Amino acid sequence: MLNSSTIVLMVFDKIFQASREVVALVISGTMEEHQFQSMADVGASKTYPQQAGTIRKNGYIVIKNRPCVVVEVSTSKTGKHGHAKCHFLAIDISNGKKLEDIVPSSHNCDVPHVNRTDYQLIDISEDGFVSLLTENGNTKDDLKLSTDDAQLTQIKEGFGKGKDLFVTFMSAIGEEPICGLKDIGPIIPS
């Protein structure tokens, strides 16, 4: 029969043998090295909480899981249940649809992290994707043209005439819709 100290010694011996084998593999270079890419937004939340009573006109809010810009806020007085209510009328930044929500002013609402970025338009592909020039000189080819007909024709006509166009994108909750267009003028050949 084995006593407890003998069992402990056997376990330590097995661990020691296994660690020696790992060290030998590392020294000989046959053990694979694991490389991990650093992703800045991994695990980062796409929204943050904000008290409903502090959200104002032209601010951002998430309504029905859609990032929106607030166009109107009205606050009712406290009723017999004790909470003042905020009525939000907002426009979805991706598709322009009007959405509304009523939330007690003391409760938290989700507010999206919104980034506004300008890119220079280089090319428009036939499948609806745009080729853009970033600030650091790289190209970005993963964004689609707008679904808004007026904006779409404005972009295509300006690009067809050889104008130097800057397209503004607003990224929120993993979406990057075109929200604006700046015409810098015709491209002057050098």
Image: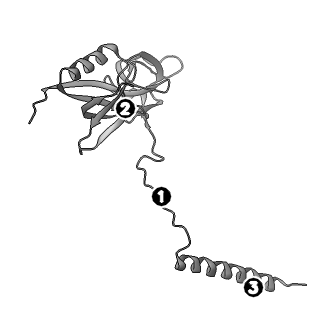
Which residue is depicted at the point 30% across and 33% down? 131
What type is the residue that disc 2 sits on? Answer: Leu
Which numbered circle lies on residue 117?
Answer: none
Where does residue 70 sit, x and y in percent of width and height?
36, 22
Which residue is depicted at the point 85% across and 85% down? 3
- Judged from this view, the residue extending furthest toward the right is 1
Quarter occupied by residue 54: top left
Where does residue 117 sit, x and y in percent of width and height?
28, 35
Mark 2 vs 3, N-terminal side? 3
Closer-to-camera residue (71/94)? 94
> Mark 2 packing: few (<14 Cα in 10 Å), some, or many (20+)?
some
* Quadrant holding the N terminus: bottom right
70 lies above or below 49: above
Secondary structure found at label 3: helix
142 lies above or below 185: below
Where does residue 128 sit, x and y in percent of width and height?
37, 25
Secondary structure found at label 2: strand
> Mark 3 packing: few (<14 Cα in 10 Å), some, or many (20+)?
few
Q: Nearer the viewer, mark 1 or mark 3?
A: 1
How far apart marks 1 and 3 lie (CA) works out to: 37 Å
Quarter occupied by residue 173: top left
Quarter occupied by residue 133: top left
Residue 14 lies left or right of residue 38; in this view the side is right
Residue corresponding to mark 3? 9
What type is the residue that disc 1 sits on? Answer: Phe
Q: Nearer the viewer, mark 2 or mark 1?
A: 2
How far apart marks 2 and 1 lie (CA) works out to: 26 Å
Residue corresponding to mark 1? 36
Residue corresponding to mark 2? 143
How far apart marks 2 and 3 lie (CA) works out to: 62 Å
Closer-to-camera residue (115/181)? 181
> Mark 1 packing: few (<14 Cα in 10 Å), some, or many (20+)?
few
